[in-house]
Image (cartoon, helix red, strand yellow):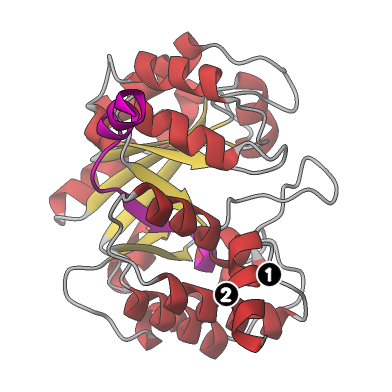
């Protein structure tokens, strides 16, 4: 009994869930999703109680056609005071579009793997950070939050192993750009609990753990375990995607982002506060899944929805 109480005491009382479905979840969908569907999804997530929603991406439509409607989406959503609506911005052109669209936070990105950086953004990690220097300065000048995202923090599809030191090096670079929050992302979902704790504890030596977030993919079914393990070492911000939107491009047929419904169900069971209405998120997940013509990639979401019909 005492052991159980001690384990509970080691977890944060409250966590922040960053909902990434409207951007990270939908960006690789092949069929064009109308702006009004994306607007409805963001509005449903707003009403569910999220304090941070990744709503748009101002990248070239040539590279990410699905995000071509981002300006329209940002203009059409019903905003709620106190909610951060985030946008991915790869360069100054993207930043200016995000600023004009009323984004509250801009997201810049790099990788902990040199091989991944070269393959995906055609430059070294150091060069990628240099490219974002102007974006970071402009965000500060205009009073916007700045978030940094580090992909392949637990493994890379090209180079394999990524060390905690390599992740910490990129955290330092993003810290020095002035990031308010830094995401440690398991892009291919290979992280396991002990490994995750080692990385999180190492990066916490370079940046406050209260401003570090875990972005876990469920490719190998480890995402919930990795979130729990992160909470045990003090991480209290996590990314998830409604209905488990977003596949993993490096493992054919594999799931990508961890499902928000599954994360919320676990948090509810642990007595960890999120401020989010699980039933409203299940409804949002069923809504977007029906539009996409497939079942949600969420065990908790599908189970709750099925129970209602029983």
Can residue 162 be seen? yes
* Residue 117 picture location, percent across and down: 60, 29
**Contact check, label 1 and label 2, Cβ < 8 Å:** yes
- Residue at the front extreme, as displayed: 1
Identify which residue, 215 or 266, lies in the foreground: 266
Whether residue 91 appears in this view of the structure is no
Residue under numbered circle 2: 285
The magenta segment is 1-22
Quadrant in the picture for residue 66: bottom right
Q: Secondary structure at mark 1?
A: loop
Q: Is residue 53 above or below residue 37?
A: above
Residue situated in front as seen by the camera: 69 or 51: 51
- Location of residue 14 in the rendering, given as x and y in whole percent from the top left corner: 25, 48
Q: Who's the residue at 41% across and 44% down the image?
A: 108
Report how far apart the C-alphas of labels 1 and 2 lie in the structure: 7 Å
Residue to which mark 1 is pinned: 296
Q: Nearer the viewer, residue 165 or 174?
A: 165
Is 5 covered by the magenta stretch?
A: yes
Q: Residue at x 40, y 15 (%)?
A: 169
Q: Quick check: 147 left or right of 269?
A: left
């Amino acid at each position: 009994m005492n052991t159980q109480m001690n384990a509970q005491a080691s977890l944060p009382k409250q966590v922040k869930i960053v909902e990434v479905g409207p951007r990270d979840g939908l960006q690789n969908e092949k069929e064009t999703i109308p702006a009004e569907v994306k607007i409805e999804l963001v509005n449903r997530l707003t009403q569910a109680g999220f304090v941070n929603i990744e709503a748009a991406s101002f990248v070239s439509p040539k590279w990410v056609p699905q995000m071509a409607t981002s300006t329209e989406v940002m203009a059409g959503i019903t905003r709620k005071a106190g909610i951060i609506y985030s946008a991915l911005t790869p360069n100054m052109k993207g930043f200016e579009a995000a600023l004009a669209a009323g984004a509250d936070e801009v997201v810049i990105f790099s990788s902990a793997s040199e091989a991944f950086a070269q393959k995906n953004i055609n430059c070294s990690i150091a060069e990628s950070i240099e490219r974002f220097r102007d974006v970071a300065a402009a965000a500060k000048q205009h009073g916007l939050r700045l978030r940094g995202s580090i992909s392949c923090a637990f493994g890379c599809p090209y180079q394999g192993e990524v060390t905690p030191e390599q992740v910490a090096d990129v955290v330092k670079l993003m810290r020095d750009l002035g990031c308010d929050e830094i995401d440690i992302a398991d892009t291919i979902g290979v992280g396991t609990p002990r490994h995750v704790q080692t990385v999180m504890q190492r990066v916490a030596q370079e940046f406050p753990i209260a401003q570090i977030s875990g972005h876990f993919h469920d490719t190998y079914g480890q995402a919930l375990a990795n979130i729990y393990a992160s909470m045990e070492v003090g991480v209290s911000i996590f990314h998830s995607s409604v209905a488990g939107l977003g596949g993993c491009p490096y493992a054919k047929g594999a799931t990508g982002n961890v499902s928000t419904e599954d994360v919320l169900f676990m948090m509810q069971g642990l007595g960890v506060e999120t401020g989010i209405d699980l039933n409203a998120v299940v409804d949002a997940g069923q809504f977007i899944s029906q539009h996409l013509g497939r079942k949600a990639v969420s065990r908790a979401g599908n189970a709750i929805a099925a129970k209602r019909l029983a």
